[in-house]
Image (spheres, helix red, strand yellow):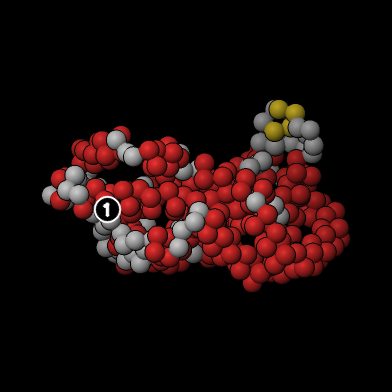
Amino acid sequence: MSLTSNGPEAQDALLNTGKSLTQDVPPQLARATMRLEFSPSYVLVGVYRLFTDKLLYIPAWDKCKHAAQRGAVVGAAWAFFTFSIQKRFIEMFLSNSPRITGLSSDTMFGYPLPFSIHTYATIMIIGSQVTRIMQFFLRKNLRIARDRAWDQTVKSRGKGPEFWQPYVEEWARPPRVASDTKQQKFVKKYLGGWFGLFVIKRVLLSPFQIYPFVGMAVTSWFRALGTAHILHRRYFESKRMSESQVQIFMEERKWDYRAFGFTAAFLESLPIIGLVFTVSNRVGAAMWAHDLEKRQHYFAEERRAGRLESLKKS
């Protein structure tokens, strides 16, 4: 996303303006304001609610259980028949490049491991393969389960379609959004989509995949903003926001979106269990959208009452 701001001094002024406007909020917005200070908490809230709310996990499981069972059977068969072959290939690869990887069969950079690094690498690779097999069987049903999880979460907050009001600018001087150049459009189209992520994850970052969680963390960092944008797509659509408004909105909260997106993408990249987190992340994103919208309502009311003079001058 190609966004620019007005420089450090302007950013400091904007942040100071935002802080002064959030210090004196009504009691009904106080808890939401506290949660908004740490956006990754909504990912954890989504996980908790999915696993504890019967109105969320029962419909999701009922929709996906048959496809998940078929995918699990095929994936288990694939893992059983190919584990020894893939492990032998990985052993040959690591034995030919011990200095590059810094690994041996029982240590990592001199530290002992509770298991063979060859075994770990094989499990991670096969886990990723089994995940893709299950995604093949679950693709349609999982998409429906995600949409239903969002709808049910919004419904549980007691809000209807009228809750989502038109976009209100919260900053006195919002950051400027630069139009994409041809090169930026090319990067966004080909390197920001599935092909770009495939190249980054499977080619450029492939040496890191054998390090515990390092490959997933690096890949999740690249996916952070894109994942956050996808998870809040329904929110932007509900508010009928234009592309420029979405870009400004995300730029004003870019580190919140990056932290939220990184946490969500990391959980989704976990083998097999990450498929469950693709549903829980929709729940967390809906909870975050609810608090953001409450804040939007507050700014809209303050503006109508004439108490935000700085916004009138923007």
Q: Nearer the viewer, residue 290 or 212?
A: 290
Residue projecting furthest to the top: 111
Q: Bin the neighbour count of mark 1 within 10 Å (Cα to Cα): few under 14, some 14-19, many 20 and up.
A: some
* Residue depicted at x 64% and y 72%: 140
The residue where tag 1 is placed is 300
Q: In this view of the protein, can residue 82 be seen by the observer?
A: no
Q: Quadrant of the N terminus?
A: bottom left
Dot 1 amino acid type: Ala
The location of residue 185, given as percent across then percent down, is 36, 66
Determine the residue positioned at 46% across, 50% down. Answer: 288
Q: What residue appears at the point 68 percent right and 54 percent down from the top-left corner?
A: 54
Q: Residue furthest bottom?
A: 140
Q: Is residue 299 above or below residue 151?
A: above
Q: Position of residue 38 (x, y in %)?
A: 45, 39
**Could you say whether the residue bearing mark 1 is in a helix, strand or loop?**
helix
- Say whether residue 158 is left or right of residue 292: right
Left or right, residue 137 beside residue 305: right
220 is higher (above) or lower (below) than 140 = above
| Image location of residue 75, percent across then percent down | 79, 62
Q: Is residue 91 visible?
A: yes
Name the side, left or right, on which 127 lies relative to 29. right
Can you tell which quarter of the image residue 108 is in? top right
Nearer to me, 294 or 183: 294
Name the residue located 70 percent from the left edge and 59 percent from the top edge: 58
Q: Position of residue 8 (x, y in %)?
A: 24, 39
* Tally of numbered tags: 1
75 displayed left or right of 38 = right
Asked whether 198 or 174 is in front, the reply is: 174
Nearest the eye: 75 or 255: 255
